[in-house]
Image (tube, rainbow, N blue to C red):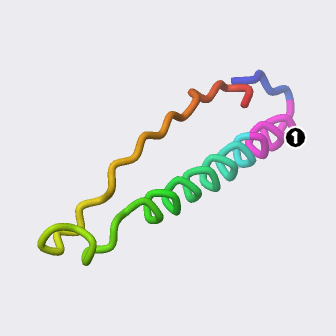
Amino acid sequence: MIPCDTLADVHSAIDQIDQLLAGLQAERARYVQEAARLQRPASASPAGSGVPAKAQCRVAPRTAAS
């Protein structure tokens, strides 16, 4: 947490957090779309079980600055 001396400082800090959150939500949405793309249609799996295809994905850990 960054020390704040004024209400404007607080608003600025909140705006920075909001930008980070929006970026993370967009990144999450891309992974949800990727998961949907990787799933097999029910007709392609044995007995129509809808078992998703296996996928390997490595995501780099996020740091506070990224």
Taking depth in this image into account, of 27 and 12 the one nearest to the observer is 27
Name the quadrant of the C terminus.
top right
Q: Main secondary structure of the magenta part?
A: helix
Q: Is residue 33 above or below residue 11?
A: below
**Badge 1: residue crowd in 10 Å (few <14, some 14–19, many ≥20):** few
Q: Label 1, secondary structure: give it.
A: helix
Q: Residue furthest left?
A: 47
Residue 65, quarter of the rendered image: top right
Residue labelled with disc 1: 8
Image point 43% across, 59% down: which residue?
38
Q: Is residue 7 above or below residue 34?
A: above
The x, y position of residue 26, in whole percent, is 64, 55
Name the quadrant of the N terminus.
top right
Q: Give the side of residue 19 with respect to residue 32, left or right.
A: right
The x, y position of residue 42, in whole percent, is 26, 74
Residue type at numbered disc 1: Ala
Q: Is residue 40 above or below residue 48?
A: above
The x, y position of residue 56, in whole percent, is 42, 40
The x, y position of residue 44, in whole percent, is 27, 72
Image point 33% across, 56% down: which residue?
53
Taking depth in this image into account, of 50 and 6 the one nearest to the observer is 50
> Which region is colored magenta?
6-16
